[in-house]
Amino acid sequence: MSKTTEIEKVKKDITSHPLDSEQAVESFRLTYLSRKGIITEMLAGIGKAAPEDRARLGKELNALKKLATSRFEEAKAARSSEKASRAAATDDPTLPPPPLPTGSSHPLSQTLEEIKNIFYRLGFTIADGPELEDDFHNFTALNFPPEHPARDMQDTFFIRKDELNPSRDLVLRTHTSPVQIRLMKEQKPPLRAIMPGRVYRNESITAKSYCLFHQVEGLYVDRNVSLADLKHTLITFAGHLFGKDLKYRIRPSFFPFTEPSLEMDIWWETGNRPGQWMEILGAGMVHPNVLSAVDIDPEIWTGFAFGMGVERITMSRFEIDDIRLLYDNDIRFLAQFP
Ligand code: PHE
């Protein structure tokens, strides 16, 4: 059979090939147009034809390919519009719409929400203060003497002096304790509040520490507030947050603004890591010097205060082992905490 009669035959086959179903359209494509299809192979065979025939063959084959391609495209379009009209016919406008994708709140926000709820039930209100603080509220009023090495406990970001008041040094607050001072200056006891907020420390960034993090400060000032009240409050709080079989310990510690001072650790055991003690908060009885600095008579009033790290608590609750994950805003990470 000469090449030309072969082409004629294929042309006939193309025109008569059924195209009335999705499978038929696909078999058409495979037979003629795919990489191993008849037309592709014929085109590849041009090189073997007699040189004087090549130009004509090329033309004829290209026309054939055009024909097959246009039949295929037409059939495909017809199939899909048929499908669409079939779908439209079965569309039920009374069905509820498909649900919209929703985000979820950040694991830090989830923890903070829970902490706030627990203290709300214990009768605490919420207060806040500025992140750009002055030396007086962040240190001096909290019984850090000037030049005292206790100021080095917290690596401070110092900000330029306050231009309106050059004697006032500005810092990014290193803890939420300055809000205690602001609250006690504004309101007189009895006082019972928590003070959540962001704090900053000039530390090197590692899996365990970041240049900013969140604390929740707590303050309770009334007549006859005792260390037993503090212990009871902390244990009740931790039991609500971590569950009944929580294992904790309370250790003596030091802060200039509390006396005595303590720290609370919880036993942290997750997945395959060995269990370990993790410090979640510092606390103590408000130092009489602090009360005096805000004109509250320490002979009449006593109080306790505590400050906890929200990141630490979040990392233990959700088994997160790198604090930086909490600040990357990587959706693959965040989507794990619906
Ligand atoms: N402000 C302390 C800190 O940042 C925590 C603390 C708060 C300790 C209140 C005692 C009382 O580490």
Image: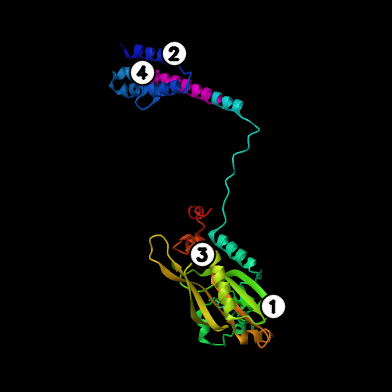
Precedes in sequence: disc 3 or disc 4:
4
- Above or below residue 66? Residue 118 is below
Element marked by disc 3: loop
Badge 1: few (under 14), some or many (20 or more) residues near its Cα, within 10 Å? few
Badge 4: few (under 14), some or many (20 or more) residues near its Cα, within 10 Å? some
**Image quarter where ligand 1 lies:** bottom right
**Residue depicted at 63% across the width and 80% down the height:** 225
> Is-magenta flag for residue 177?
no
Mark 4 against mark 1, which lies toward the viewer?
Answer: 1
The residue indicated by pointer 2 is: 16
The residue indicated by pointer 4 is: 57
Precedes in sequence: disc 2 or disc 1:
2
Precedes in sequence: disc 4 or disc 2:
2
- Above or below residue 7? Residue 105 is below
The residue indicated by pointer 1 is: 190
Residues at circles 3 and 1 in contact by the CB criterion of under 8 Å? no
Magenta stretch? 58-81
- Whether residue 30 is visible here, answered yes or no, is yes
Badge 2: few (under 14), some or many (20 or more) residues near its Cα, within 10 Å? few
The amino acid on which the numbered mark 2 sits, given as a three-letter code, is Ser
Precedes in sequence: disc 3 or disc 2:
2
The residue indicated by pointer 3 is: 244
CA distance separating discs 3 and 2: 78 Å
Mark 3 against mark 2, which lies toward the viewer?
Answer: 3
Precedes in sequence: disc 3 or disc 1:
1
